[in-house]
């Protein structure tokens, strides 16, 4: 096993699903083995100061990217850091935290790939890219329920942030090893939770499991619930794996076997049966739902972390 922490980056715009994805990955790896850090803690200004200066939290100038990069370098060699703490609830800074990295470190936030020095520190880089209409629903739900905003305030903030999203957040997609896009099926355009499909762009920057086994011809004329195809993303060749929200447990289990086949000693936690928290999320009325596309995404990312730890 690696004698240094294995570092995962999860980058995406506000309310793109970073925390939900992170939670399931930590479940697979063992929460006691995982240190989770939010790169939004490296904001330079608090909420009041941002409003006074007319700058958004998405702009690089609003963040101490040099300190974030320095801390990443320290974490990679197993050194502790004194991490700043930003409260999304109050919009203010709290006392810093002494962080000693565990076996696995997950950094999730807005600008994790903004500098080349930071990008060099990750063992795996994931970018979340849901359709903007879906991200808007997620952000309205989260910010009204958990952060005290009204729906009109959230929509106005999204409009204000859009130029910075386009200029600074979305371009980071090019650096990702895996691009994750949850999206509603065509017949359920208003779906925003448990029945979403997922499209995983798998770049050849890291060795992925051999998913060609799922390419056996379908016996019907209907579109299969799990699909693998060659595609291009940002003008570069990629594999694209898609899993529909209506995929059955049996179909999902076949993918699970492929992902976990290289890690037989982890069959208990590296499975939907062995880890019941995989794919869990909260519905619009507070109910607990399970999404197989989310579970498989969490499994795939965990697979890469565990493989990196074996090197």
Image (cartoon, grey):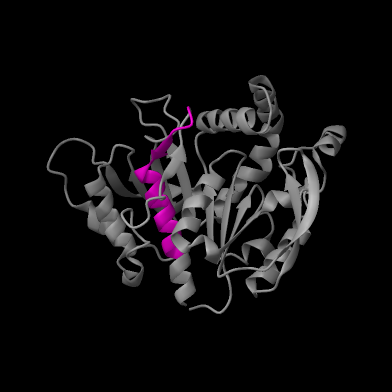
Q: Is residue 287 magenta?
A: yes
Residue at 63% x, 31% y: name it.
Answer: 143
Residue 235 shows in this picture: no
Asked whether the viewer can see residue 172, the reply is yes
Q: Is residue 307 magenta?
A: no
Residue segment shown in magenta:
285-304
Please tell me which residue lies in front, 302 or 148: 148
- Where on the picture, by quarter, is residue 92? top right
Question: How many marks overall?
Answer: 0
Instruction: Determine the residue positioned at 58% across, 57% down.
Output: 9
Image x and y of residue 46, in percent: 81, 42
Q: Residue furthest left?
A: 219
Q: Which quarter of the figure has residue 175? A: bottom right
The residue nearer to you, when weighing 121 against 252, is 252
- Image position, residue 291 (x, y; %): 38, 41
Determine whether, in the image, residue 181 is placed left or right of residue 241.
right
Dominant SS in magenta: helix
x%, y% of residue 208?
A: 39, 62
Q: Quadrant of residue 193?
A: top left
Residue in the image at 41% along x and 46% along y:
279
**128 and 96: which is toward the camera:** 96
Would you place residue 99 above or below residue 134 in this image?
Answer: below
The vertical placement of 75 against 19, above or below, is below
On the image, the x and y values in percent for residue 37 come to 64, 56
């Amino acid at each position: 096993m690696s004698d240094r922490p294995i570092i995962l980056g999860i980058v995406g715009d506000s309310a793109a699903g970073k925390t939900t994805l992170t939670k399931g990955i930590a479940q697979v790896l063992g929460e006691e083995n995982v240190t989770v850090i939010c790169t939004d803690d490296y904001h330079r200004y608090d909420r009041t100061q941002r409003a006074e200066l007319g700058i958004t939290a998405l702009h690089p100038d609003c963040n101490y990217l040099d300190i974030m990069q320095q801390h990443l370098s320290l974490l990679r060699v197993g050194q502790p850091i004194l991490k700043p703490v930003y409260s999304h609830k109050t919009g203010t800074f709290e006392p810093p935290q002494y962080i000693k990295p565990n076996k696995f470190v997950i950094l999730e936030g807005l600008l994790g790939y903004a500098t080349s020095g930071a990008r060099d520190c990750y063992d795996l880089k994931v970018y979340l890219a849901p359709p903007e209409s879906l991200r808007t629903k997620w952000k309205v739900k989260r910010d009204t329920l958990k952060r005290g905003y009204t729906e009109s305030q959230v929509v106005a903030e999204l409009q204000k942030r859009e130029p910075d999203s386009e200029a600074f957040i979305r371009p980071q997609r090019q650096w990702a090893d895996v691009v994750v896009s949850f999206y509603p099926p065509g017949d359920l355009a208003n779906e925003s939770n448990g029945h979403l499909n997922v499209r995983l762009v798998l770049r050849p920057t890291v060795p992925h499991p051999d998913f060609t086994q799922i390419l056996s011809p379908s016996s019907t004329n209907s579109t299969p619930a799990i699909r693998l195809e060659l595609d291009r993303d940002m003008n570069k060749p990629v594999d694209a794996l898609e899993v529909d929200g209506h995929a059955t447990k049996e179909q999902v289990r076949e993918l699970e076997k492929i992902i976990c086949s290289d890690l037989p000693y982890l069959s208990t936690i590296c499975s939907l049966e062995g880890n019941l928290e995989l794919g869990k999320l909260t519905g619009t009325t507070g109910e607990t739902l399970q999404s197989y596309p989310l579970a498989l995404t969490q499994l795939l990312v965990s697979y890469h972390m565990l493989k990196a730890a074996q090197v």
